[in-house]
Amino acid sequence: MSIDRVDLNLLVYLDALLKERNVTKAAHQLGLSQPAMSNGLRRLREVFEDPLLIRTSDGMTPTERAQELQPTIREVLATIDKAVQPQTEFDAMTSSRVFRIMASDYAEPTLIPPLVERLRKEAPGISLDIMTPSDVNFYDVEQGKVDMVINRFDSMPQSFHQKNLWRDRFVCLFSRNNPIVDNFNLETYLQAHHIWVNKTGMGAGVGINPKDVQRRGWVDNALFEIGKTRNIRVYTRHYQAAMQLASQQDLIVTIPYKATLLPVPTEEFVVMEAPFSIPEMTLSMAWSPLLQHNPAHRWMRGLITEIAQEIDAKGFIFSN
């Protein structure tokens, strides 16, 4: 096949079709009529000599050839997008851009306040729209509707760009009046009452099933590996709420260390290393390939990375 046979608009059509897997939705995404998109699919089939999308009981299913083409098509379109971007430098001081950032309950209070402080000095016209994981899905990010997502991710679309911001270890936080404060070990940890806090991934969440130990997350998975379980009394998705609840003298919360740096009355608490091994967690930032070369986006990613490095350099301080 010669390149002179390929209309670049057809690549845009194919990208939309492979993402939507529906002719009508793909047409709506590109502002085309349904007949125009159907005609585009017919021409694509002729160019690639393959059906590309086949109607099945699950809707329009990509052929093997289409699946092979998809990452290449995305790369080609991203390269073209880069080529047509204006070459002028981004001026943060005069910009009035709104950045939409999805930040987890762990990332938002640890990373966003110093980011806002820097923006007030270096880019006073820029606004932030901070969203929760339940507000966003991967499709929103892929389309560039959300600038970046900051969270711990179990999985990520291969087309996304990603940068690790920091790694964090788990610690135990509890009241100085807790009876186990002078005898804290695995045995007393397991005998105590616990606050569960965990929210990863994206999309609307569902309630926790107390009997489903293996789906509780980092801490309980680590306990499961050594044949132990803990006595959970409160389930929450919010780190600050969990730490406030830990002020009650019979409750313990096991959380990433940097969450303990949030503004809580630290004189009321002790922070201790967990009495068993828990794998560290990684906080990551991810964004769409469509925004990879955008000058404003590059500037914001660099600023977030710089602030994350400053936070990460603080190190660990445990109670005596």
Image: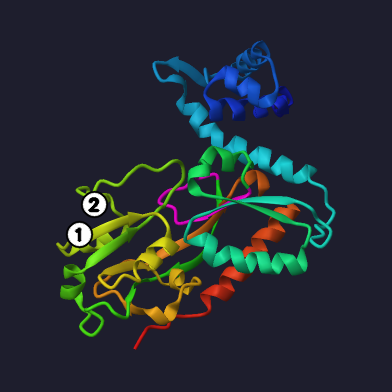
What segment carries the magenta color?
Answer: 147-159
- Residue at point 84%, 59% (across, down): 94
Q: Magenta stretch mostly in which secondary structure?
A: loop
Q: Quadrant of residue 173?
A: bottom left
Q: Is residue 123 above or below residue 171?
A: above
Mark 1, residue position: 224
- Colouring mode (rainbow / by chain / secondary structure / one colour): rainbow
Tell me if mark 2 has few (under 14), some (14-19) or many (20+) residues whose alpha carbon lies within 10 angstroms of its own. some
Mark 2, residue position: 214
Determine if the magenta segment contains residue 72. no
Quadrant of the image for the N terminus?
top right
Is tag 2's residue or tag 1's residue first in the polypeptide sequence? 2
Which amino acid, mark 1? Phe
Q: Picture coordinates of residue 150 (x, y %)? A: 53, 56
- Residue at point 39%, 16% (across, down): 57
Q: Is residue 123 above or below residue 134?
A: below
